[in-house]
Image: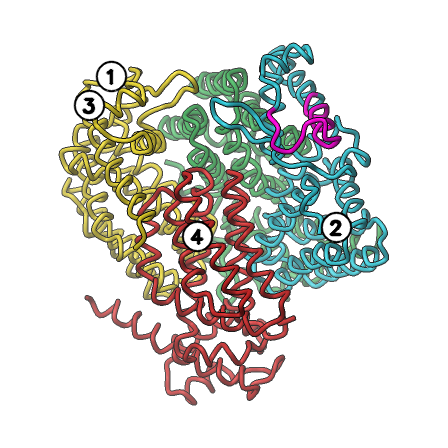
Chain colours: A cyan, B green, C red, D yellow
Amino acid sequence: MDSGRLTIRKRKTLSDQLYGQILEQIVSGTLEQGEKLPSENQICSAFGVSRPVVREALRKLQDDGLVEARRGVGSFVRKRPPQRLIEFATADSVSGLMRAMEARMVVEKATAKLAAQRAGSHEIARIEAALKALDDTMQRREVARDADFDFHLAVAEASGNEVFVTMLNAIRDVMERAIDVAQSITREGSQSRIDRVVREHRQVYEAIVARDAEAAGLSMAYHLLQSRQRVTDYAREE
Amino acid sequence: MDSGRLTIRKRKTLSDQLYGQILEQIVSGTLEQGEKLPSENQICSAFGVSRPVVREALRKLQDDGLVEARRGVGSFVRKRPPQRLIEFATADSVSGLMRAMEARMVVEKATAKLAAQRAGSHEIARIEAALKALDDTMQRREVARDADFDFHLAVAEASGNEVFVTMLNAIRDVMERAIDVAQSITREGSQSRIDRVVREHRQVYEAIVARDAEAAGLSMAYHLLQSRQRVTDYAREE
Amino acid sequence: MDSGRLTIRKRKTLSDQLYGQILEQIVSGTLEQGEKLPSENQICSAFGVSRPVVREALRKLQDDGLVEARRGVGSFVRKRPPQRLIEFATADSVSGLMRAMEARMVVEKATAKLAAQRAGSHEIARIEAALKALDDTMQRREVARDADFDFHLAVAEASGNEVFVTMLNAIRDVMERAIDVAQSITREGSQSRIDRVVREHRQVYEAIVARDAEAAGLSMAYHLLQSRQRVTDYAREE
Amino acid sequence: MDSGRLTIRKRKTLSDQLYGQILEQIVSGTLEQGEKLPSENQICSAFGVSRPVVREALRKLQDDGLVEARRGVGSFVRKRPPQRLIEFATADSVSGLMRAMEARMVVEKATAKLAAQRAGSHEIARIEAALKALDDTMQRREVARDADFDFHLAVAEASGNEVFVTMLNAIRDVMERAIDVAQSITREGSQSRIDRVVREHRQVYEAIVARDAEAAGLSMAYHLLQSRQRVTDYAREE
């Protein structure tokens, strides 16, 4: 491995740690909603990291909707994620979980579309079973990590393309941790919140059964988008 | 692992083998372009496999543009891939290579878009270096497997999302074999064919440099589509 | 205009009329959910139309999720739309309204994405005003046709591309009728249904304000998908 | 119509005029490739327009790849379009032509996908006839405006959704002018350039015939992207 790649890797690791430290201050309220973050220079010296590391951390916080950049003015706290986010995951690892959500939106939109076109009765039965287990477990207010993962894996299996299954299995660890966090936050929420999560999964299932590829891909992408927002936005908790 | 999943897996393996055997007959000319394939029933008994296996193999041949289904009439050979396809890859493995191409179109369209939005100067330099190595190697009519893989990995690194890199690395083996086959077929083609492959990569690079996310994603998807067609269509060899 | 095009046009008009007549039988319950439709031949002679006309009508009913084709068996009623659908629109015109929904999903996904990237403060203020009017009017259980249309037009204006505005204005008539039908069905539904429609619009608005192009496009496409389903699926009425 | 909307409209008109004047200076070489543009303030006073007008013009020039913004430094000329661009169209109108290209990429990607799924033999014959006329006319180095427009309209007719046809007809005027400009620039180029334009159309046609929706949509979007670049990039002329 050449040194150019090593430099990129190192920057990524450091930026994820810095992301975690800024995140902790936002969650704890040390940095309040609407408050201006210190300047890039100040962050560089406060944390002893280089400017590219700071920029990458801020860019990721921005991509995740936690921070907002105003051109020529600076970065501001946009929203405050629930406390649970850094209890269930270490703050360091949250950036990785968010990147996994981004990648899943791409891959699983495709698996859902293909599943609607190609799933046989066996594959549909597997998706249905996972959906039922998810519904039952969530209604009991337990963490439905296995059922949730199974649902998404069953959709990938139904895509008729094993390569997507291999890809999801390659990130199984980070997917499961992301599901854990999301499920933990949901099960402490209102009944309507639990119902909404179940309904999002059901819409994916129904579009696959109806052989509506466009609706299946869209429902999956929407579900993952909502899931990402539930995890980062405390105020959305209804 | 439950038996339902095992059944699905076994069907996939058998269907890929059957795919390979039909493919061999198309490449060798035993089944000519435009010729009608035996019926599902006939294939079932000739190869001793179940109907779902036959259907999956035919569906895949159809998705890859090799076979065409006419409703209520049967399946017909659509085009004849180059001999090289089953020399460089075993016939059994071709179906897997084609599925990898499909998955890459999804994932790499996203990495190219994100790279256009997020790549720093380090990442762009890496992509440029891989492009130069690819161009030099191909102009010498050598197989540019490493440079080709490096180019695509460098774009993934530039996406600012390590999860995509993990996904591509998880299918590195099948990606490299697919690149091998495509490169082998290309380097025996005309100079204009070699130029075209290099140009497709250059368009991706230029769109990333120009920060044009739409153009970057589109150029990457188009390149992979063309690549898939070069591998399956003998007649396109110019 | 050449005769080939005339033939296509005539087939489209006839197929929309046939669509309307089958739709009426589904809404009235003459054709029950799960019931098999007459064969293509039977429909040809019953309505005195050619086979291409019948196929196009059935294909459209299928695209809209009202009818389901089982290969080699025939077509079956999938779901029963609310009575309101053919009260507010003539049965003849429903097919056209559904095609407008399909086109809007394509165009407005793009306008929402671009609005997130390009909207200035003026444009955002217009979208916000339309959202407020929509919310107020719907909470009073009135038909918010103007506010609804204004919302979608304001998003198009915010895309920074007048051509999209021209396109939406060119179909304004059919868009307004589709909005009328959807709004009429919604306002007679439960409060939670009204809240859902308002929330879908709000999500689009919030994604634009947050400059999240991916989320904006996805939320818009999801809203139009849901809207299409509310109009065609009686059972979804909660 | 309220005053907010009038303000937005007026800004758009003025920004398109300013776009045209800056474009003229780039084409004539008054502003050289790589040269820094005057600051926003300087442009405001030189042309007597407000800052939002200047920003919109610069944003459009950037979207079209003609100008590049370097954060905190200013805007620079990226590439020089061919002289022909402002001979065939007035400089004022070029911005509108470019916006039409952007909208067409969205709409026609969808029409090509749907055509691959729904086109009957009549519709395919129409597309084929337009392709043949386009090829013949371009090989004679004449401007194939009608054949080009017919090709794209025939694909829209084949989408099975009249609303897309209505949308394209609503922008027929600007589409025809854009085709005129592109065709005029192409017919004065090399033979390989003419062949490339014909091949791009043929790829769309072949994907529709092969019922490959993904390939059809991608080939159409790629063709329009290339077309946009041919019009704006003098150096690409080979």
> Can you tell which of label 4 and label 1 is closer to the viewer?
4
Do we see residue A231 in this rendering?
A: yes
Label 2 secondary element: helix
> Above or below — where is C142 with respect to B188?
below
What residue is disc 3 on?
A: D25
Query: Percent position (x, y) of residue A113?
Result: 58, 53
Magenta segment boundaries in residue numbering? A18-36
Q: Marks 3 and 1: same chain? A: yes
Q: For residue C67, which quarter of the picture? A: bottom right
Identify the residue position indicated by label 4 in the image. C108
Foreground tag (2 vs 3): 3
**Crowd band around label 4 with a 10 angstrom C-alpha radius: few (<14), some (14–19), many (20+):** many
Name the residue at 32% across, 43% down: D8
Give coordinates of residue A79: x percent, y percent: 64, 37
Residue receiving disc 1: D32
Q: CA distance from mark 2 to mark 1?
A: 61 Å
For the point 28% across and 53% down, which residue is it? D151
Q: Is residue B164 above or below residue A196?
A: above
